[in-house]
């Protein structure tokens, strides 16, 4: 039972950090392999820990972003949050589809947190998509999970580097778009003057 608590806490901590780190499924695979845990229990406990981590992340990221992001850009991001909150089913569908893909969820929760979208609007879709995608990854990677050396090398593979770079690029692109101009006047403008 103690090892499942480790899975929960580790998944929570991995998804609580304000930068793109290793995905929570690597933690789940590690503990499942190392201690011979039930894979379904690991998935349930790990995904719940991950969801709580992302929930807490989306609550504190606006405080961090307000220290580094210009006021005008912060207002722009909050504006898009208000627009997205009005289209409840669309944002839920987007979150579900996004989490079904093997993409880092940090950009998703950074954007939603900064836009002040209520976490409860996106968490149910996140839970469904996260459980499904993690289940597929953990099940198909079961053979690789039995090899601890392969997992440790996987933290610094070309896939993890590419995932990190693409996640950072997604956040930068999201921040650089003038969302108010795009949504109100249907004009695209990109500005890299987002920092204080």
Image: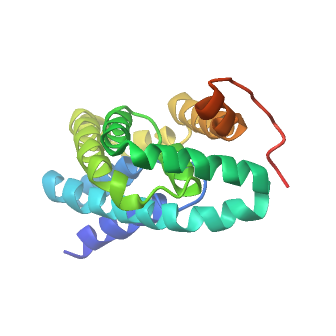
Name the residue at the bottom extreme.
2
Residue 2 x/y as whole percent:
25, 76
Q: Total of numbered circles in the picture?
A: 0
Which residue is at 69% across, 59% downward? Answer: 65
Is residue 157 visible in the rendered image? The answer is no
79 displayed left or right of 16: right
Residue 87 x/y as whole percent:
38, 42
Is residue 153 visible in the rendered image? The answer is yes
Front position in the image: 166 or 66: 66
18 displayed left or right of 101: right
Front position in the image: 98 or 70: 70
Colour pattern of the rendering: rainbow
Query: Quadrant of the rendered structure where residue 170 is?
Result: top right
Q: Quadrant of the C terminus?
A: bottom right
Query: Quadrant of the rendered structure where residue 119 is?
Result: bottom left
Which residue is at 35% across, 54% downward? Answer: 121
Residue 71 x/y as whole percent:
77, 57
Query: Relative to residue 123, is residue 96 depicted above or below?
Result: above
Front position in the image: 108 or 33: 108
33 displayed left or right of 196: left
Which residue is at 42% across, 43% downward? Answer: 151
């Amino acid at each position: 039972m103690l090892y499942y608590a480790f899975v929960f806490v580790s998944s929570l901590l991995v998804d609580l950090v304000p930068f793109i780190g290793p995905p929570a499924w690597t933690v789940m695979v590690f503990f499942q392999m190392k201690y011979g845990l039930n894979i379904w229990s690991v998935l349930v406990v790990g995904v719940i820990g991950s969801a709580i981590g992302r929930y807490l992340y989306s609550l504190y990221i606006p405080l961090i972003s307000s220290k580094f992001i210009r006021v005008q850009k912060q207002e722009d991001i909050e504006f898009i949050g208000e627009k997205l909150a009005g289209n409840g089913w669309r944002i839920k569908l987007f979150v579900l589809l996004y989490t079904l893909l093997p993409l880092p969820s940090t950009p998703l929760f950074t954007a939603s947190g900064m836009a002040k979208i209520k976490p409860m609007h996106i968490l149910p879709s996140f839970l469904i998509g996260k459980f499904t995608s993690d289940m597929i990854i953990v099940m198909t990677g079961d053979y690789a999970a039995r090899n601890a050396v392969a997992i440790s090398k996987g933290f610094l593979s070309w896939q993890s580097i590419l995932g990190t770079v693409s996640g950072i690029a997604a956040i930068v692109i999201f921040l650089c778009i003038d969302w108010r101009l795009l949504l109100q006047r249907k004009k695209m403008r990109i500005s890299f003057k987002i920092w204080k």
